[in-house]
Image: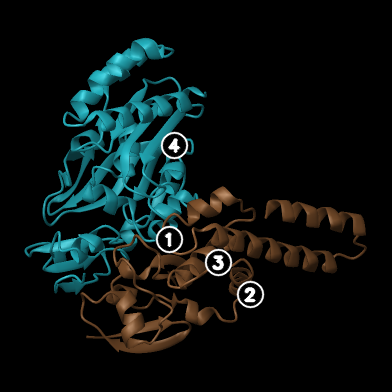
Chain colours: A cyan, B brown
Amino acid sequence: MKPSSFEYQRPDSLAAAMAALAGQEATPMSGGQSLLILLRMRMTEASTLIDVSRLPELSASSLDQGILRIGAGTTHAAIEDGLVPDASCGMMARVAGGIAYRAVRNVGTIGGSLALSDPAADWPVCLLALGASVVVQGESGERRHAMADFLTGTFTTLLEPGELLTRIEMPALPTGSRWGYAKLARKHGAFADSLGAAVLPAGGDPRMVLGATMEHARLLTRSMEALARDPDLGWDVLAPILRDDIAEADPNADAYRLRCHVATLRKALLQARGY
Amino acid sequence: MRIQLELNGDRTRVDVEPRDILADTLREACGLTSVHLGCEHGSCGACTIEIDGQVARSCLILSIAAEGRPVRTLDGLAEDPVMQALKQSFHRKHALQCGFCTPGMLMIARDMIRRHDRLDEATVREGLAGHICRCTGYVGIVDAILDAHASLSDRHADSQADNQAGDRAGDRADHHHETRRAG
């Protein structure tokens, strides 16, 4: 199908983009790799598209004094290829390389993915596990949200109309930290049935995240507390705790989906522990 | 509105609406009929092109957003050595039947060969996951890509060896062996 008609603007600076987004019904578009599908299928509509894919303010990344900043307009492929500094012990490059297909990764962006907040998306899971925050540019300046607060529901975040997600910030994962990431999908590049992440920061508390739920990615707090008390906790003890966490994170999951969730989380933890 | 596109090295002016999709503009307005439209929502890979030197799906790019960014389609790669090797291998290994998916397959195959010094079957199959072929069962396509990669590696090794003064025959044979295994 073809999208219905809309207006199109391509501002050349962040200030111009903010002005274009203010005071009218405008939809920002970065790579458009999800938005154009939704527009083509007429599952959503836009009166004006503001193309933010060429804004220089969204393309810069840096690693400075232990804080990684990634411009929201950075493509998945740039992260996959190591063109931005790494502060995740290689986790982000691995996750990026598993998103959709290379031809999509060359165009789609990390900020666009977070702003859309598809429940089956990889970045919310990965960045929640890495303790990242997002920076949002609003009418009255910048504000920061931890990923856990930013994700509020299915395709829903704390972003308000007229605002723009400009960058991702995260503390560098200490050297020697370990991580695991597992995705279950019908085929490579397809939407995930389950996403599991485990991060064991050197000298810090473990983090476990479940994604591809009905709503949004979630930290599995009971399991994290249990692992903080005993990092070597055996599967026999951890499994029932994980199941409680999963039931809370994805209450409507059927038996198949529950098994997928247990499988990805177990695999992620085993990877992180080095098995 | 009228925009300027850079297609296969030529500058072209076309009239578009903001909602026009690059794949449609390339086919309908510019006559670049190697761009095939299958699913029109990013799943089948038949419309794969190159923009800014990177493979992309032309069904998921607005024509107007391609303004000022060099676009390359299969039509513009007739002289490309990697593409020539791929076409020969696709012929040799029976990598097509109806041919509908083939332009997209060739575009992603060229990208895989250019990005990987070493290619194995698993990597090729992963790379082809976003490309749908309803005829071949993929076996011939996978074989053809590995075959083209190996033939290009051999050619590369030959030219390297030719350039090396005092090259010993034994080393050269070893090198060949290595690149074949890598292919």
Q: Measure the C-alpha gap from mark 1 to mark 4.
A: 31 Å
Q: Which mark is residue B95?
A: 3
Q: Measure the C-alpha gap from mark 1 to mark 2.
A: 23 Å
Same chain? Circles 3 and 2: yes
* Label 1 vs 2, first from the N-terminus: 2
- Judge left or right: residue A147 versus residue A172: left
Same chain? Circles 4 and 2: no
Same chain? Circles 1 and 4: no
- Compared to A249, does B178 lie above or below? below
Q: Measure the C-alpha gap from mark 3 to mark 1.
A: 13 Å
Same chain? Circles 1 and 2: yes
* Label 3 vs 2, first from the N-terminus: 2
Give the secondary structure at mark 1.
loop
Q: Chain of mark 1?
A: B
Compare residues B174 and A84 and report the one nearer the observer.
Answer: B174
Q: Chain of mark 4?
A: A
Residue corresponding to mark 1: B131
Residue corresponding to mark 4: A88
Give the secondary structure at mark 4.
loop
Q: Nearer the viewer, mark 1 or mark 2?
A: 1
Q: Looking at the picture, which amino acid does disc 4 mark? A: Ser
Q: Residue at x 21, y 74 (%)?
A: B19
* Label 3 vs 1, first from the N-terminus: 3
Q: Measure the C-alpha gap from mark 3 to mark 4.
A: 40 Å
Q: Looking at the picture, which amino acid does disc 1 mark? A: His
Q: Nearer the viewer, mark 3 or mark 1?
A: 3
Asked if residue B160 shows in the view, the reply is yes
Same chain? Circles 3 and 4: no
- Judge left or right: residue A71 versus residue A90: left
Residue corresponding to mark 2: B81
Q: Measure the C-alpha gap from mark 4 to mark 2.
A: 38 Å
**10 Å crowding of disc 4: few (<14), some (14-19), many (20+):** many
